[in-house]
Amino acid sequence: MFSNPLAGCTNISSADPFQKVKLGNSGLETTLLGMGCGVNGGNRTSFMTRQDKSKSLALLEYAYEAGIRYFDGADLYGTHGMIAEAFQNIPREEIIIGSKIWTRPGGIPEPERPDADIVVDRFRKELNTDYIDLMQLHCMVTADWTETEKRQMDILSDLKSKGIIRAHGVSVHTWEAMKAVVGNPWVDVLHARINPYGIAMDKPEPEEVVSLIHQLHDSGKGVIGMKLVGGGKYTEEGDKIDNALRFVLGLGSVDMIIVGFENEAQIDNYTGRMKSALSAIKSA
């Protein structure tokens, strides 16, 4: 598998970075390339909130015009309002909005951690939307998160049954937290850190992470790949980016990837690199 990471790809239908893909059995369908809206995020600030607002709005609009239809937010990032403003004139069904709830200590200004229904209601107001496509628990790190977060999971299940959210899941930031997803029917979609270098991943050995991702994907879970460039470690190294794209997109078990773009040129750059990677995958 690792001598030929392009083998066994089942989800790629063309060399188009904006082709529609299904996120496992979640019922969500969106573009292969999505945009992360929380570069260097924390305490409701991020790259997009720190630069001039007009630039961030223009960046979101450019991403949409380029073909991106998935936009990944979180309470930590402080970008809900920008997403709402940038797409206020776009039909809601044209985009998929994901967000994430922070339940751990720190991370957001308030010490209180209201229940998920209260938080999601605030998110909907911030995003100016009746529903949110994907709601995840953010940055789970313990092996027992499915027990400690059971109340919030149940609340999110209820919100899903009411159509307030369309799917729920988790982003994981440790190996133990990722293993806890195995066999858990509650998780519709997970964010998983994956690249061929073991940088900013849940295990330094990509083989182990890939094996678990295959298992999770085979069980019907949608898999969103993140940290493709190691959390920004090799943003300027084109060869490593190309290798990472070929590796991750060729696995056949990562449904889509998200990238935290900081300018329009990066979107164009990734679009071109993805086309090349996808062409190589299709001809392998």
Image (spheres, grey):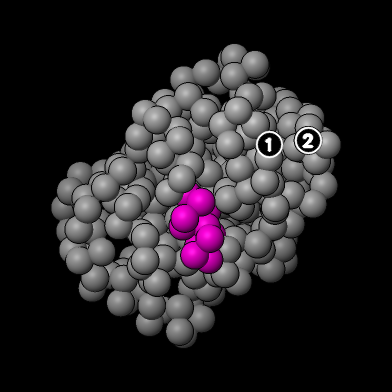
Ranked by sequence position, the earlier of labels 1 and 2 is 1
233 vs 124, nearest the viewer: 233
The structure residue drawn at horizontal position 58% and vertical position 50%, both measured from the top left corner, is: 253
Where is residue 17 shown, x and y percent of the image?
Answer: 75, 43
Segment tinted magenta in the rendering: 213-223
The structure residue drawn at horizontal position 56% and vertical position 31%, both measured from the top left corner, is: 2
The answer to which quarter of the image holds residue 244 is top right
Residue 155 seen: yes
Task: Determine which of the numbered discs, if any, sits on residue 6 in the image.
Answer: 1
134 vs 38, nearest the viewer: 134
Residue 121 seen: no
Q: Which quadrant: the N terminus?
A: top right
Q: Kindly state the secondary structure of the residue where label 1 is placed.
A: loop
The structure residue drawn at horizontal position 40% and vertical position 72%, both measured from the top left corner, is: 185
Where is residue 202 shown, x and y percent of the image?
Answer: 35, 38
The reply to whether dot 1 and dot 2 touch (C-beta < 8 Å) is yes
Q: Which residue is mark 2?
A: 284
Rendered view: 191 above or below 88: above
Residue type at mark 2: give it: Ala
